[in-house]
Image (cartoon, rainbow, N blue to C red):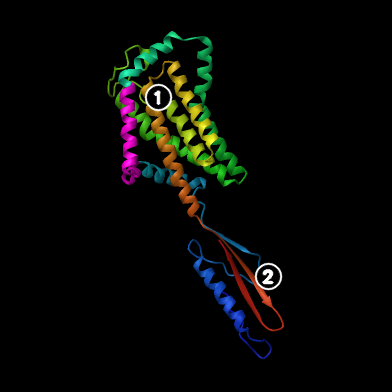
Amino acid sequence: MIRPLKASPMRPALSAAALKSCALLLGLATLARAEAPLVESTPNQAPVVVVAPDAEAFPRLPALLWTDTKQVFQSPSAWTSSDWNHLWLGAAGLVVAGVALDSPIDKAFQRSAKPSWTNAAKNVEFLGGTGSILIAGGAYLGGAALDNREVRSVGIDLGISMAIAQLTLTIPLKNLVGRDRPSKDQGAGHFQPLGGGQSFPSGHTTQAFVLASVISEHADQTWVTGLSYGLASLVGVARMEQRQHFLSDVLGGAIIGTYVGRTVTRYNQTQRDATSHVKVAFQPLLSSEYKGAVVRVSF
């Protein structure tokens, strides 16, 4: 705390107005100490910036991954009836697709198979594999190198969402369900739990919809949302054209990717918005009538 200089025969006392101004400013400075203590200054010291520790610095990412994972699995406890209705609607859609549409659509892709379609599908599905990983890594490294936290946060949300979606949901479900891929020609209803089948859900589609949902949440623009989800949908179509997945596999991956990407991004954004960046500046006040100091606080 910076105290006004005491009056002395050679040093005039602070005026009443100056004392009130200093008391008010120092009171505001005290209120702004929620994240970090103020740093005392001397009259010639430059303004001091007091900020909260960077919760998304590289060494802290494992802790953030754990926090986001808990959020993904705990958030349904706060769902409204509307949220649960959407879940049941999605589940019903998966069942209908699995029973009525999986086999007809797979046969339609077999009949229309062309080399040009195959090449196009291979190019598109790259976005749901290596391409999405490169985008996430590039956003994180680019943001860190340019000291741009917004760009870096896109990479963080992408990387964490992909890890959660794949490691805790998609891969365990693949092994648990044990559905054979269409290319095995065992039929859409062939399931062998823990038997090695890897068809449900689609990992590429999961990845593509994580990418779409995270970018959509950060951009918050209609055309970006439409383009992102449109490209993600093409990844799912490409996986069906390659006979690596049925329609219900693709829908399952889309639901997982969208849910995890949106949940992680929205939660992390609330934490970023709550971070306080407090600027504290010291300024001496010298005149023929009084001598003192003012602490200016902005946040």
Q: Is residue 88 magenta?
A: yes
Mark 1: which amino acid? Val
So how many labels did they put on this image?
A: 2
CA distance for labels 1 and 2 = 64 Å
Q: Is residue 86 magenta?
A: yes
Judged by its main secondary structure, the magenta piece is helix
Q: Is residue 23 visible?
A: yes
**Percent from the top left, x then y, of residue 142?**
60, 39
What residue appears at the point 61 percent right and 81 percent down from the top-left corner? 17
**Percent from the top left, x then y, of residue 185?**
35, 11
SS under mark 2? loop
Q: Nearer the viewer, residue 191 or 10?
A: 191
Residue 100 versus residue 130 in the image, above or below: above
Q: Nearer the viewer, residue 52 or 240?
A: 240
**Percent from the top left, x then y, of residue 208?**
47, 29
Whichever of callouts 1 and 2 sits on the residue coming sooner in the sequence is: 2
For the N terminus, which image quadrant?
A: bottom right
Left or right: 283 in relation to 206: right
Left or right: 156 in relation to 49: left
**Percent from the top left, x then y, of residue 141?**
57, 39
Q: Which residues are magenta?
A: 73-97
The residue labelled by disc 2 is 44
Instruction: Name the disc covering residue 250, or none.
Output: 1
Mark 2: give few (<14), some (14-19) or many (20+) Cα within 10 Å.
few
